Image (spheres, coloured by chain):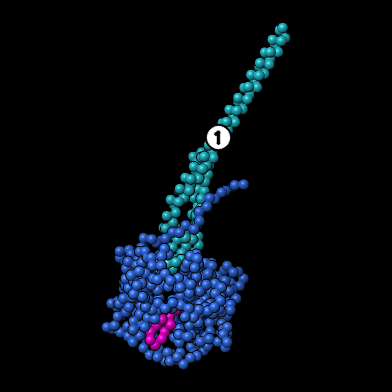
Chain colours: A cyan, B blue
Amino acid sequence: MAAVKGIVLVMALIFLLVMTLLVSAMLLVSQLSHKAAFSGQQQLQLSHQALQQHMQQIPQLADAAIAPNELLTTCPAEYAAWSVGSLTCEVLQLDTDVYSDNRYFYASYSSVVLRKTVVENEE
Amino acid sequence: MQPWFYLNLLLLSGAGFCCDLNSPVPIEVNIPTVQDVHTPRKVLLSNNVQLQVPQADGVLKMHSADTLALLDEVSSWPTLTSSIGRIQAQPIAIDLNYDGLADAVYSIDITGLLWFVPLSAQGFASPVLVADFSQTHAIFNQPLQLAQITTPDSNGVMRRQIMLLVIARTSAGDILIAVKHQAGQITPWQLTDLSDRTNLTADEPLYGIDELLWSQIQQGGGWFMRLNQRITATPQVYAGVVYLTSAPAAVVNTDCSIAPGANLALHAVHLHHAGLIYANRSWLLNTTDAGKLVLKKNQQGELALSLQNAQLSQTLLTELLAINADCADCVDELSQTEFPQLIRLATFQTEHGAH
């Protein structure tokens, strides 16, 4: 009778152990999936923020002091065309990047911009 | 050559003929070196005037800008006689692929044969006839101007073309010709392929250019205007508007200034169809000076069209307008605040260490 009781006790303990393991595993998996889901969201938010900052910086390229990557001898064709030499065209590349506060996440954008300047003199 | 041509030449030898808008020096262009097609080398392109052979057949020569050594020449042209009339008009080079190197040069002989001469590291390639205006019996001895344009085709798709501004001189006055050139063009344009825009219809100032006429101009080779006056400043194109000055041939001096008491006229026409931009296509100016048309910033910081020479700079027009592709007659204000103008060509996400 005592042996039977012992077996029942062992079985109950094993059952409890298995259940504990199962619950722990489920908790871990749910935590991981939450983390994974959150990291994706964070990366998306960071990319959006990086793009916003990148677009805000493009107008600053109008500053003539920023050196161009390439100076075109002829401006690209357009409907409202200009005589050769009356317009200066430069190609600039703007590179910006953003890191998350914990530096685990990173987003970077680049733009190629054409800067057109009228060739004129001060009076 | 036709007797008409010689008659025009004889008549033009009188008043106004000497208002020469050409630069006396050869034009300087960059072409690729033989060893490396990306490395530029400076060359000088000379016509009959700079070569001091004014009475010889048409010739273009290419000299090294550093050593002045002759690199190449075009003296044999794809015509029946292998020769053309002398070249007095200053040619103009074009960079078609925006690599900083000239890909071709446009040149016109005195009888009105307009040539497209491709350039390579070796020199000139075979000339291609773009237009034959010899039936005008005019004298073509003034510099060429060009603008790279996009213009809608019959399907409304914007196509890239070259618009050349050519001045034809006759005893009755100058003709301003705007002729288009497109890669692969086989048949040379003639004046009959271009729309005569000397006079506007009574409706055009009120309702804009006729749709059918606009369509014809788009399909055709361009337009021309008989000014009945002598052009005194090289035409300039600013924001799709062609500006030039003119005066009656009889009052134009050799230096392109005009006789006291006479008035210079300023013309401003639409680059694509020579229509109205401002209230009138031309109006009289209160000046008799010669000079170049330039854009300048005035004291208010606005862009203004000015007549400039070594001694003076006179504002001719403020509140400039720019053409707009939304419709055939659409115009916008050309504001200095728009410049420098930024056009975003591409934006892309860059990844580092991604795999």
Q: Which residues are magenta?
A: B165-176
Seen in the image, is B57 located left or right of residue A15? left
- The type of residue carrying mark 1 is Lys
Which element is circle 1 on?
helix
Query: Quick one: A30 or B41, which is closer to the camera?
Result: A30
Q: Is residue B305 visible?
A: no
Relative vertical location of residue A96 with respect to residue B105 in this rendering, above or below: above
Q: Quadrant of residue A104?
A: top right
Label tally: 1
Q: Nearer the viewer, residue B265 or B29?
A: B265
User: Magenta stretch mostly in which secondary structure?
Assistant: strand
Residue A19 versus residue B119 in the image, above or below: above
The answer to whether residue A39 shows anywhere in this view is yes
Please provide percent x and percent y for residue B71.
57, 79
Where does the image place residue A60, in percent across and percent down from the top left?
Answer: 42, 54
Q: Quadrant of the N terminus of chain A?
A: top right
Locate residue A71 relative to residue B270 in the image: left or right.
right
Furthest toward the left, the residue is B261
User: Was residue B174 drawn as part of the magenta stretch in this picture?
Assistant: yes
Task: Based on the picture, tell me whether residue B30 belongs to the magenta stretch.
Answer: no
Question: On the image, numbered disc 1 is attached to which residue?
Answer: A35
